[in-house]
Image (cartoon, coloured by chain):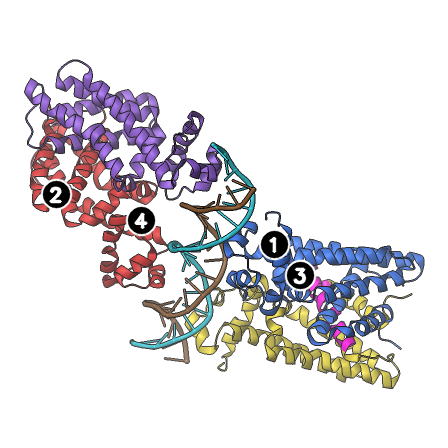
Chain colours: A purple, B red, C yellow, D blue, E brown, F cyan
Amino acid sequence: MRTLPAPMREKVLAAADLIAEHGLDATKMEDIAASTGVPKATLYYYFEGKEEILTFLFTEILDEVRQAVAGALQSGGTAAQRLEATIVAHLRVFERFPMASRALQFDLGRAARIPLIAERTDAAFVNPVRDLLVEGVLDGSLREMDHPTLVATAILGAVTTTGINALTIQPRRQLRRVATELVRFVLAGVTA
Amino acid sequence: MRTLPAPMREKVLAAADLIAEHGLDATKMEDIAASTGVPKATLYYYFEGKEEILTFLFTEILDEVRQAVAGALQSGGTAAQRLEATIVAHLRVFERFPMASRALQFDLGRAARIPLIAERTDAAFVNPVRDLLVEGVLDGSLREMDHPTLVATAILGAVTTTGINALTIQPRRQLRRVATELVRFVLAGVTA
Amino acid sequence: MRTLPAPMREKVLAAADLIAEHGLDATKMEDIAASTGVPKATLYYYFEGKEEILTFLFTEILDEVRQAVAGALQSGGTAAQRLEATIVAHLRVFERFPMASRALQFDLGRAARIPLIAERTDAAFVNPVRDLLVEGVLDGSLREMDHPTLVATAILGAVTTTGINALTIQPRRQLRRVATELVRFVLAGVTA
Amino acid sequence: MRTLPAPMREKVLAAADLIAEHGLDATKMEDIAASTGVPKATLYYYFEGKEEILTFLFTEILDEVRQAVAGALQSGGTAAQRLEATIVAHLRVFERFPMASRALQFDLGRAARIPLIAERTDAAFVNPVRDLLVEGVLDGSLREMDHPTLVATAILGAVTTTGINALTIQPRRQLRRVATELVRFVLAGVTA
DNA sequence: CATGAATGAGCTTTCATTCAT
DNA sequence: CATGAATGAAAGCTCATTCAT
């Protein structure tokens, strides 16, 4: 993959809409070319192939998530407070890149089979959150857990599923309410 | 879709492995035919097309989930106890049909665009769990929630993501441990 | 081809409509089965294959033409008068079996490649008319011709093309007017 | 349909032979590709589908007819003389493009269902000849007719049927004789 | 006699990809 | 650098036909 000129980068990012709507396999290079205005052959000049476009898109999103999460982790307060900030930050990425997020979620199977993507998912969310959970035990703000990685995965599942659902169905303004309810669920569960 | 004779049903269900491994789009009808021993034309005699095979597979899984969840809901005890049973029951479906469950999760985007599947997901898990959450408030075993549907969705996300992860990576025996940790997370969250 | 029971014969003749509308190749056995109510396998019990159905249909029509023409030829009068009767009789077959006639005309290429059909076309119209033209020279009612077969073919072309056109586009009542104009053309040409 | 480069145009026109021999439906894209040397995918790059190739072929022929007829109409003399020239010109097109003409005649049904073809047939032959017939009444060279369009259609039928017959069966040199006999038939009919 | 079930053998069409310019 | 033109390599789907009952 060659370095993309900025305008090209923007145009290709816009292809996320197409992919989110139809899935990668149902999205033809022809469609991407038509929708971005970038000729097919030019896309091939910059990308190795269709899959690399998907990888590019997903890498971008995961990098956003990574940065957002990293930022939240550096905010002050207890681990619990930072976990809350992390979840909110994650949801904000969904808010900023709704279609690309949706594409990532919907082409999950494909994504999971691309090693680079799997690694980055862990690096962006699972590992930092797992570390945070462990920290929280130490600072006393979180309870002990036998399998913190598993819990971090569960949190990832809860956040993404709910986030995508909210994005797809609900108007954006509601993201706040979603965040509040979700954070409460993650922190306190559902028991009275 | 024509009514499937029992042996055919079995053979087609076995195709889930293929799909789980490669994703529906990368799985050719040729492959399904070869792997099941059912001639391509015969598959087309029973199914309208490739997508209908996916729908059939997913419908079967979701029906298992529905039954499992329905059974758990009828077990005795408080809402909290039944929620626990529900989660365990859901994970057991993953244990019994690992590949089909994985296929469903991995072809999520495809599935989400098939209305029948979306409906059945809600009917099988989200709605019953939402109702259970509401009941739990009444019987005092669960806390109040502003958006029980959202929480039910979050639980679904946590269970499936964790379940698939456990299935894909871990040996089965561990499902018990996964269940225990997951139930604790859902019921009590992560706060100390 | 087995002998058809009368009700079957009727049903299959009705398939002419389908074939006239879409052409034989675009008409599937499935369609014929659906439209006639005769199961596909039963059609195969009576006919050797799809082409034989076409042959049956066309043979029936050509037999009607043959009979009609033969009848007209036996009517009294000069050769010119009998030629007129022949043309009118031919047009009446179009009137009685519009769709089958149209099917025959439209699947002309196919028909011409089936030897049986080619023979019968000649036997039904071209040869009798050629003979009539020769007779006409003898009885003085018709002019001499160098190539009576060629002229008979030209008459066939004029009658069928005009007849099909009239059938397809115009209401039936007009067939009289068509006949009058056509007979005048054939007998007297267009010169003043 | 994309604009065809000249060499491509030639190659595709040569496909008429194949189609004339077997009919469009029996002619596989594979065959056309093999016979023209143009890869299947390239054919699809230029044409929308198989039918569009047929349309292209027929349109070309009809355009030849149109030009030939138009030229004949502009020749000097009475309407009767120009009608004669028209028929001869029409037959010459058969002589120059025997296979394509035959294909058109044999896939008549297909052609008749393509509106573009129907229109062009009228534009190329029926309408000009009808106008000529009307003119002929005025200049006194032709008799009055109640339905000149019908007579023009009859002439078209006589010419094409006879022309195709002559092409298919007879050696070419004979076209002159065919023309002479046919012109006499159209102008003077068969009455003594 | 009739027919529901099953399938072999293709065919059209699609599309990612290439490459000369 | 960018791209219009061209194509190799499938793949989904169709349908005439068969045959056990």
Q: What residue type is labelled 1?
A: Met
Q: What residue type is labelled 2?
A: Gln
Residue in the picture at 72% in, 55% down: D63
Of residues B129 and B40, the one nearer the viewer is: B40
| Crowd band around label 3 with a 10 angstrom C-alpha radius: few (<14), some (14–19), many (20+) | few
Give the letter of the chain under mark 4: B
Query: Is the same chain shared between marks 2 and 4?
Result: yes
Q: Give the range drawn in magenta.
A: C150-173
Q: Mark 2 points at which residue?
A: B170
Q: Mark 4 points at which residue?
A: B24
**Above-or-below relation of B30 to A181:** below
Q: Which amino acid does label 3 sit on?
A: Thr
Give the letter of the chain under mark 3: C
The percent position of residue A158, horizontal first and vertical second, equals 21, 31
Q: Which of marks 2 and 4 is nearer the N terminus?
A: 4
Residue C192 inside the magenta-drawn segment: no
Q: Can residue B54 be seen in this view?
A: yes
Label 2–label 4 contact, CB within 8 A:
no
Residue C156 inside the magenta-drawn segment: yes
Q: Mark 1 points at which residue?
A: D8
Q: Nearer the viewer, mark 4 or mark 3?
A: 4
Q: Give the CA distance from mark 2 to mark 1.
A: 60 Å
Query: Is the same chain shared between marks 4 and 1?
Result: no
> Regarding mark 2 in the picture, which secondary structure is present there?
loop
Label 2–label 3 contact, CB within 8 A:
no
Q: Nearer the viewer, mark 2 or mark 4?
A: 2
Of residues A177 and A135, the one nearer the viewer is: A135
The percent position of residue D159, horizontal first and vertical second, equals 76, 67
Q: Which amino acid does label 4 sit on?
A: Leu
| Crowd band around label 4 with a 10 angstrom C-alpha radius: few (<14), some (14–19), many (20+) | many
Residue D173 located left or right of residue A164: right
